[in-house]
Image (spheres, rainbow, N blue to C red):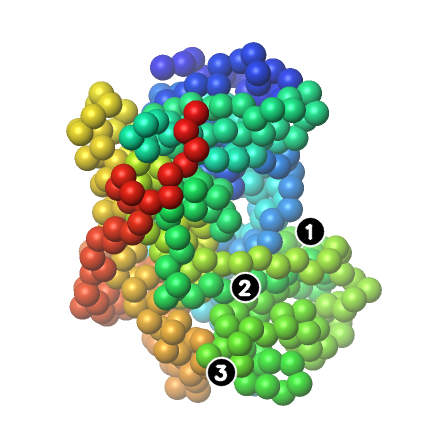
Amino acid sequence: MREQPTDPATTDTDAREASRTDTDAQVIVVGAGPAGSSAAYHLARAGVDVILLEKARFPREKVCGDGLTPRAVHQLIRMGVDITAPGWTRSRGMCWVAGKHRVHIEWPALGRYPDFGLSRSRHDFDDILARHAVAAGARLYSGWKAERPLTDRAGRVTGVAASSDSPDVPEPVDFRAPVVIAADGASARLALALGLERDPRRQIATAARRYYRSPERSREEYLELWADLRFPDGGPYLPGYGWIFPMGDGRVNVGLGALPHRRHGKADLRATLDQWLARTPQEWGLREENAEGPVRSAALPLGFNRHPLYARGLLLVGDSGGMVSPWNGEGIAQAMEAGEVAAETAALALAHAQGPRREQVLRGYPVEMNRRWGRYYRLGNTAADLVFSRSGFQPVLNRYVMGSPFLLDLLARLLTDLTDKPSRDVADHVLNTAFRLVPAPGPSRRRGAGRGGAPARKR
């Protein structure tokens, strides 16, 4: 156990020092996004010696809507992040737009979660979380890219080889730990090195976003979602939705996310975005002359699209494990929650000596993640396949739903996974009962789960 540092900046290790500092730890976390920083924070708080590797240097850009649901806010509170500080913009709920209908849905008042959401640019959101992990005692190595896992003769992961962006360290450096947490994003470099392939049956959505200067919309109290977008040139409804999220600083985050259409394939998101914004009011300012930066896009791996979530000393969290919600494309809340669960699992495992008992604890991680989201994601994957990928949200947001406060509240809780358990609330009872009726996904063992699979390079 190490004494926690008093100055967070002192533990962001310089590249020139890495070759002569201790690169061994109890846990190595690869990737300092929401999943990785959450894992590193909770590990450090538990007294675990943890190294956090990040290939970029903060602050840095990430493609995201920047909107945080109450479930994500809950995770920020659990990390002790000061969400009352300047830069955080609160939201009261969602505003759904479909055709001529515009309805506002308040975030539900639940016992487990706050009744508000937040917005914060990923440009500094990830930096805040990483620094919070450092303040708790994690050792952050910025500018270090994990190239491959290191394994022993039995094929068990014993660390990672990482390269620095500094010319002073031309050769990869070995970072060693008995447990590695892969938070390396949708590329899933470490998982692929162990033969953990993506499940081809699972959908992958695509998102694109851009910032616009819009004082008119920047301080709105609701996260606005448009469900009536179409393919360019009057095609079918887009299997997804558009968003306008207030940033509180004179800007809005505008973007859209979509699944591939069953018949028409992938939409040209840039053309769809331009077509949509052209019909927004001129006074909103969502025009080219008010844009900040280019349109950026990213893939969204949905609904546990990679299995198993643990194999041979490697735990997958966030996009690496395909944890983006198939219901709404949200990923930050899930990433942070998975990071906390992975941290708790690793800390408990390290209380045991290397051997069967430690391995048993580590194998409990995918079991716990399946318990939390297995049924919810299974139902969401089915909805994505049968409904969203054909007609988007239009069949869901029909005039009957839009005209019913109860159904709208039910839909909001369903899309954002916001329910109390147990609860006497009727909406909670309906949803919790529905999820219990969904058959639980069985344990999945794919190539690479045991000693088989593509072997990583041994060092």
Q: Residue at x 20, y 25 (%)?
A: 355
The alpha-carbon separation of the residues under discs 3 and 2 comes to 17 Å
Q: Residue at x 34, y 27 (%)?
A: 152
Q: Which quarter of the rendered picture does the C terminus lie within?
A: top left
Residue 227 seen: no
Q: Which mark is residue 249?
A: 1
| Secondary element at tag 1 | loop
Relative vertical location of residue 328 with respect to residue 373 in this rendering, above or below: below
At label 1, which amino acid type do we have? Answer: Asp
Apparent side of residue 350 relative to residue 7 in the rendered image (left or right): left
| Secondary element at tag 3 | loop
Circle nearer the N terminus (3, 2): 2
Q: Residue at x 68, y 20 (%)?
A: 168
The alpha-carbon separation of the residues under discs 1 and 3 comes to 40 Å
Foreground: disc 3 or disc 2: 3
Q: Residue under circle 2? A: 206
Q: Nearer the viewer, residue 364 or 66?
A: 364
